[in-house]
Amino acid sequence: MNYNKKTVKDIDVKGKKVLLRCDFNVPMAKDGSGVITDDKRIRAALPTIQYLLDQGAAVIACSHMGKPVATFDSYKKKQLEKGKDEASITEEKWKKSLAELRMEPVAARLSELLGKPVILADDVVGPDATAKAAALKPGEIMLLQNTRFEKGETKNDPELAKKLAGMAEVYVSDAFGAVHRAHATTAGVAAHLPAVSGFLIQKELDFIGGALANPKRPLVAILGGSKVSSKIGVINNLLEIADTIIIGGGMAYTFSAAQGGKVGDSLLEADWKDYANDMVKKAADKGVKLLLPIDTVIADKFAPDADSKVVKAGEIPDGWQGLDIGPETVKLYCDAVADAGTVIWNGPMGVFEFDKFAVGTKAVAEALSKTSAITIIGGGDSAAAVQQLGYADKMSHISTGGGASLEFMEGKELPGVACLLDA
C-alpha cells in the first residue's frame, strides 16, 4: 500500500465546501443523559477543522456514532436474536435507541472547543442537511446527523455516496479509526470528489507507515493481548520487517502450550498451537529474535484480590492461570527495547485492569518512556494502558484506531486510505 498521500495542505480549499469525515464515535454516559464521558476524539479532529476554517473553507463534518439500527424491522430481528420477548420490542424503544445516538452532544462540545457555532443537520442527506450545506458560508462549520442512520452507509451504497459528495467540492478523510472499513463516508465519496487526508490520518501514515516501510533499526514489536488468532496476521507481517518480536499477554500461553508447556487454566487457543509453532519456526528461519516469557505471575482465580505466585513459563499447575509476565521476563523485555530504534507496541502484557497484574504492562510502558526510540502505540487496549498508567505524553505516537492500526500492521490495504490521492 502507498502510504504517501496528499493532505489538506496540498490542495486549495479557499471558498470551497469540504466534506470532512471525522471519528466522533465518543463514549457516552450509560444513563441516557447525553453526557460525553471522554472527548479526546473530538479534540483530535480540531487541528484539521481549524486549518480548514482558517483557510476559508466551509466545513461539512460527518461521523458515525455507535451501532444504530436503521429500520425497525432490523431492530426487531436483532432483539429477537438476543432472546428478547417479542411483546417487549416496541417502535418506541427502537426510536429511543436512535435518539441516544444522535449528534447533538457532539455538536455542542465541538462548538465549545472551537469557540464558534456548529450548525447541526437533522438528517444525513435529507432536505435539512442539503439545505444547510447549500447555505453554508466560508469559515462556517456544520455537522451531519449520525451517518449510520443511513442503512446504505456500512454497505458503501453508491447512491448515498453520490448524495454526500453532491454537498461538497472536496473530501477530507480524518477518521483513522474507520479507514479499515469501506463505507460510503470513508471510501465511497472519494469516487466523486478529490480526496485527501487530514492531519490525524497523515500522522498515522507517517508513524505507522514509516515504521513498516523504512523503520529506524532495530525495529522491536511488542505484541500482547488475549488471543493469538487476532494477532496472527500482525505477527506474520512483522516477521518480514522486525528485528525482534516480543510476545506477552494471554496469547503467550498458546505459544507455551504449543511448545509442550503446562499452562493450567490459563487462556488457551488450542486450535492455534500449530500456527504458534509455525511462527516460532519462521522467526528462526528469518533470523528474527522471537522472545517468549520465561516466567509468569499466576493466580488461583481471575480476580483483583487473587492469591498469586511466580513460576517458570510452561510450569503452571492445574487450577492456576497466568495473568502477567514474571520479573525475569520483565527484565528481558525491558532490556530488549532499551537500544531499539523503533518500537511498535500493541496489546498489554497481562490483566492490567487489576493493579496486582499490571506490573508487566507498567514496566514495559516505563521502559518505552525512557528509550530514545520512536515509540508507536497501536491503539486499543495498549493505548488505554499507556493513558491509564500516565505515560501517554512520553510516547512518539498513540494510534487513534484499534482495528485500523491492527490491519495496517498486518499489511492489509485500508480502503479509506487507498482511495486518497497519491502525493
Image (cartoon, rainbow, N blue to C red):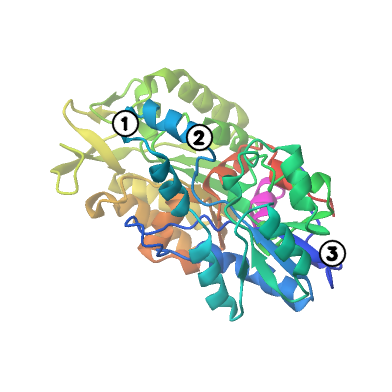
Q: Quadrant of the N terminus?
A: top right
Secondary structure mainly formed by the magenta segment: helix
Q: Which residue is mark 1?
A: 87
Query: Horizontally, is 1 left or right of 343 in the view?
Result: right
Mark 1 or 3, which is nearer the eye? Answer: 1
**Nearer to me, 416 or 108:** 108
Asked if marks 1 and 3 touch (Cβ < 8 Å), the reply is no
Residue 75's label in the rendered image is none
Residue lying at 49% horizontally and 44% vertically, measured from the top left: 67
Instruction: Please tell me whether residue 111 is drawn above or below residue 42 in the rendered image.
Output: below
Q: Which residue is mark 2?
A: 231
Residue 2 visible to the viewer: no
Residue 10's label in the rendered image is 3
The numbered mark, 1 or 3, whose residue comes first in the sequence reads: 3
**Nearer to me, 171 or 331:** 171
Choose top left, top right, bottom left or bottom right for residue 235. Answer: top right
**Chain part drawn in magenta:** 203-215
Residue lying at 15% horizontally and 44% vertically, measured from the top left: 306
Q: In the image, is residue 264 part of the stretch drawn in magenta?
A: no
Q: Position of residue 8 (x, y in %)?
A: 78, 64
Q: CA distance from mark 3 to mark 2?
A: 35 Å
Helix, strand or loop at mark 3? helix
Q: Residues within 10 Å of mark 1 (few under 14, many from 20)?
A: few
Helix, strand or loop at mark 1? helix
Q: Amino acid at mark 1?
A: Ala
Residue lying at 40% horizontally and 47% vertically, measured from the top left: 348
Q: Position of residue 389 (x, y in %)?
A: 36, 62
Q: Position of residue 73 (x, y in %)?
A: 49, 32
The numbered mark, 3 or 2, whose residue comes first in the sequence reads: 3
